C-alpha cells in the first residue's frame, strides 16, 4: 500500500480540506502515516494568514530537501492558501516540490499525484486571482470541494466540520484570505443537509458549520427565495442523531436578531458565538475596514446576552496593527472586560503582501512592543476567563466527551483509549472540561459537576460514574468488552493539527 503523510496548518477550513484530500486518496489505496520519511506522498496543507505560518512550512520543506533528493520517486506537494498566493516563491524556495495546488483545486490532487509520478514534471493547479477575470469566472475557479466523506478521517467519529460557505468578500485591510480563498459563495442548503444527514447516519453527533463569515451565509434559490444561516440551523435541528450544532466564524455586523433568536430557540444550537472584534478603537477598526464601530460591537454583545443569558462569546484581536498607539491598544483590554469574552485568540499584526494595509500603511509598531501588547492582552483575557470559570464551580454541565486529555495521551499514548484515564470534552457553551473516566464514555454526553478551574480549563467529576469507577478500580476495566468506535480510534490516525 502506498503511504501518505499530510501536515496541516491554518484554520478549521484547512483541517476539513485535509480530511477530504486524505479521504479521496485513501479510496485510491493510500494508507496514512505520521512519519513523512516513510511516506510515498508527502503533502503540506498551508496557511498564509501570518508570516509565521508560511515560515513553518518552508522550514519543514527544507528539512525534507535531502530526503527528496535521495528518493526522487517520492512526491512532495504544497497545497492550500500559500500555494495559491505564492506559487513562484514556493517553486523558487523549494524547487524540489512536485505539486503546488491552491485550495480551490483540491479535487485534482489525486490526478496531480499520478501525473507527477508518470511525467516527473511539476504539476500546478490554481484558481484565478481576484483581478484576473470577472466575478463569475473567478468564483467558478474556486470549486466547492465537498466529496463523499470518509468517517475514519474525521477528528473524531462523532464530530465533523461541514463547509457551508467558501471564500470571503469582506476585505479587511490586513487580511489575505479574500485573495487566496476567492469570492464568497454559499453552498446549496440541500447539499449541506444531505451531508449532515449522511454524517448523522455514520454516528456523527456534533456538526460545526464552517465559513470565514459564516453568519453572512446566504443562498439565492433563483426564484426569489433566499436561505440564511438561521434557516439552516432550523433544518439541522430536525436531523435525528445530531445533538449539537456550532458555527464559526461570525462577522459582528451580520449577527442579526433572527440568528440570535434561532440560537436561543434551537435546542441543539450551542450557546457559543465566535465573533472576532479585532480591536477596541474606532480609528483602528476603520483602518482595518471592519465595517462597524466599538459602540455597535458592544450593542451586539448586549443583544446576544439579553436573548441568551448563558451565551459564551469569544473573540480574536490583532495587536500592533499599523499606527496603533498605547492608548488605542488599551481599548482592547477595555473591550475584553466589557464583553467578558470566554476566550480570545490574540495575534501580532503580520503584514501580508497584496493586502490594502500593506499598500497603504506602515507596519510601524516594533516587534518587542507587539509581543508585550500580546502578553498584556492575554493577561486581561486570562483574568476574565478565570472569573468566568470560578462562577461555574459547583454547577453541573452536559459534556460531549471528545477523547483522552492531552496529558493522558502524552503519558499513556494509545493505552489512554483502553483504561481509566483523564478525559476531555466540551459543554454546550464550548467550555473545555477535564475529568477522570473510562474511555467507553468517549462520544457520549455525560453530566459533570465542576469542582476546580484554571483560566483555560474546568475540572470536574462525572457523578453517576463515581460508583462505577470505584467498582472498575477493584475489578479492572472490562477488557473483553468491545470499545466503542470513538474509543477505538487510534491517536496516530488523527489528522495533525498545528494551529498557528
Ligand atoms: N474569517 C475569520 C478569520 C480570519 S483569519 C474572521 O473574520 O474572523 C483568523 C484571524 O487571524 C483573524 O480573525 C485575525 O484576528 C487574524 N489575522 C488575519 N490577518 C492577520 C494578519 N495579517 N496579521 C495578524 N493576524 C491576522
Ligand atoms: Fe479576513 Fe476579514 Fe474575511 Fe475574516 S472577514 S476572512 S478577517 S477579510
Ligand atoms: Fe485559513 Fe490560513 Fe487560508 S486562516 S483560509 S488556511 S490563509
Image (cartoon, grey):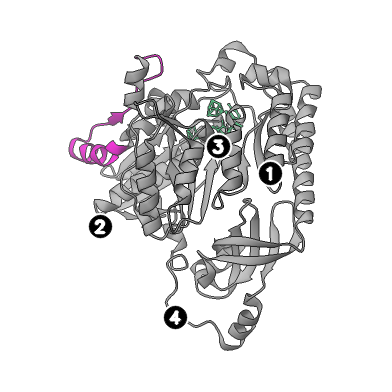
Which label sits in the foreground, 1 or 3?
A: 3
Q: Using the image, tell me which numbered label, if any, was put on residue 343.
A: 1
Residue corresponding to mark 3: 249
Judge the density around disc 4: few (<14), some (14-19), many (≥20) Cα neighbours within 10 Å: few
Residue 84 position (above or below residue 203): above
4 vs 2, front mark: 4
Q: CA distance from mark 4 to mark 2?
A: 31 Å
The image position of residue 360, as x and y in percent, is 60, 11
Give the SS element for disc 3: loop
Which is closer to the viewer, label 2 or label 3? Answer: 3
Disc 4 versus disc 1: distance between alpha carbons? 39 Å
Extent of the magenta region: 107-133
Above or below, comparing residue 311 to residue 471 in the picture? above
Query: Do the CB atoms of the residues marked 2 and 3 lie less than 8 Å apart?
Result: no
Residue at 61 percent across and 88 percent down: it is 474
- Residue 1: which disc? 2
- Distance between the Cα atoms at labels 3 and 4? 40 Å
Instruction: Give the CA distance from mark 2 to mark 1.
Output: 44 Å
Q: Which numbered disc flags the more N-terminal residue, 4 or 1?
A: 1
Amino acid at each position: 500500500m502506498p503511504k501518505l503523510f499530510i501536515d496541516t496548518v491554518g484554520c478549521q477550513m484547512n483541517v476539513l480540506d485535509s480530511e477530504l484530500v486524505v479521504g479521496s486518496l485513501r479510496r485510491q489505496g493510500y494508507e496514512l502515516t505520521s512519519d513523512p520519511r516513510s511516506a510515498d506522498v508527502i503533502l503540506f496543507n498551508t496557511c498564509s494568514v501570518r508570516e509565521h505560518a508560511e515560515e513553518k512550512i518552508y522550514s519543514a520543506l527544507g528539512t525534507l530537501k535531502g530526503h527528496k533528493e535521495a528518493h526522487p520517486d517520492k512526491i512532495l506537494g504544497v497545497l492550500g492558501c500559500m500555494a495559491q498566493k505564492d506559487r513562484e516563491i514556493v517553486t523558487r524556495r523549494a524547487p524540489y516540490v512536485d505539486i503546488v495546488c491552491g485550495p480551490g483545486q483540491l479535487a485534482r490532487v489525486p490526478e496531480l499525484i499520478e501525473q507527477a509520478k508518470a511525467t516527473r514534471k511539476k504539476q500546478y493547479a490554481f484558481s484565478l486571482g481576484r483581478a484576473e477575470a470577472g466575478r463569475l469566472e473567478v468564483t467558478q475557479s474556486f470549486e466547492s470541494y465537498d466529496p463523499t466523506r470518509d468517517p475514519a478521517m474525521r477528528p473524531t467519529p462523532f464530530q465533523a466540520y461541514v463547509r457551508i460557505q467558501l471564500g470571503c468578500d469582506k476585505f479587511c485591510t490586513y487580511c489575505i484570505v479574500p485573495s487566496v480563498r476567492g469570492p464568497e459563495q454559499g453552498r446549496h442548503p440541500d447539499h449541506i443537509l444531505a451531508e449532515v444527514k449522511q454524517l448523522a447516519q455514520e454516528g456523527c453527533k456534533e456538526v460545526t458549520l464552517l465559513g470565514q463569515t459564516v453568519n453572512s451565509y446566504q443562498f439565492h434559490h433563483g426564484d426569489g427565495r433566499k436561505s440564511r444561516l438561521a434557516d439552516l440551523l432550523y433544518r439541522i435541528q430536525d436531523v435525528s442523531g445530531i445533538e449539537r450544532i456550532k458555527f464559526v466564524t461570525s462577522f459582528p455586523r451580520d449577527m442579526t436578531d433572527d440568528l440570535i433568536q434561532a440560537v436561543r430557540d434551537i435546542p441543539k444550537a450551542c450557546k457559543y458565538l465566535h465573533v472576532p472584534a479585532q480591536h477596541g478603537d474606532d480609528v483602528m477598526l476603520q483602518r482595518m475596514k471592519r465595517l462597524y464601530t466599538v459602540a455597535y460591537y458592544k450593542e451586539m454583545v448586549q443583544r446576544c446576552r439579553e436573548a441568551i443569558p448563558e451565551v459564551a462569546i469569544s473573540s480574536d484581536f490583532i495587536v500592533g496593527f499599523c499606527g496603533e498607539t498605547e492608548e488605542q491598544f488599551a481599548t482592547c483590554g477595555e473591550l475584553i472586560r466589557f464583553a467578558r469574552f470566554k476566550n480570545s485568540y490574540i495575534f501580532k499584526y503580520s503584514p501580508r503582501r497584496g493586502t490594502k494595509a500593506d499598500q497603504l500603511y506602515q507596519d510601524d509598531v516594533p516587534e518587542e512592543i507587539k509581543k508585550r501588547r500580546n502578553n498584556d492582552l492575554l493577561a486581561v483575557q486570562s483574568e476574565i476567563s478565570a472569573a468566568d470559570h470560578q462562577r461555574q464551580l459547583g454547577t453541573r454541565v452536559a459534556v460531549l466527551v471528545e477523547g483522552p486529555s492531552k496529558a493522558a495521551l502524552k503519558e499513556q499514548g494509545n493505552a489512554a483509549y483502553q483504561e481509566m484515564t483523564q478525559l476531555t470534552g466540551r459543554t454546550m457553551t464550548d467550555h473545555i472540561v477535564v475529568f477522570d473516566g473510562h474511555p467507553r464514555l468517549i462520544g457520549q454526553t455525560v453530566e459533570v459537576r465542576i469542582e476546580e478551574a484554571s483560566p483555560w480549563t474546568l475540572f470536574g467529576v462525572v457523578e453517576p460514574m463515581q460508583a462505577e469507577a470505584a467498582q472498575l478500580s477493584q475489578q479492572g476495566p472490562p477488557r473483553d468488552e468491545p470499545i466503542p468506535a470513538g474509543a477505538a480510534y487510534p491517536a496516530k490516525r488523527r489528522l495533525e493539527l498545528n494551529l498557528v
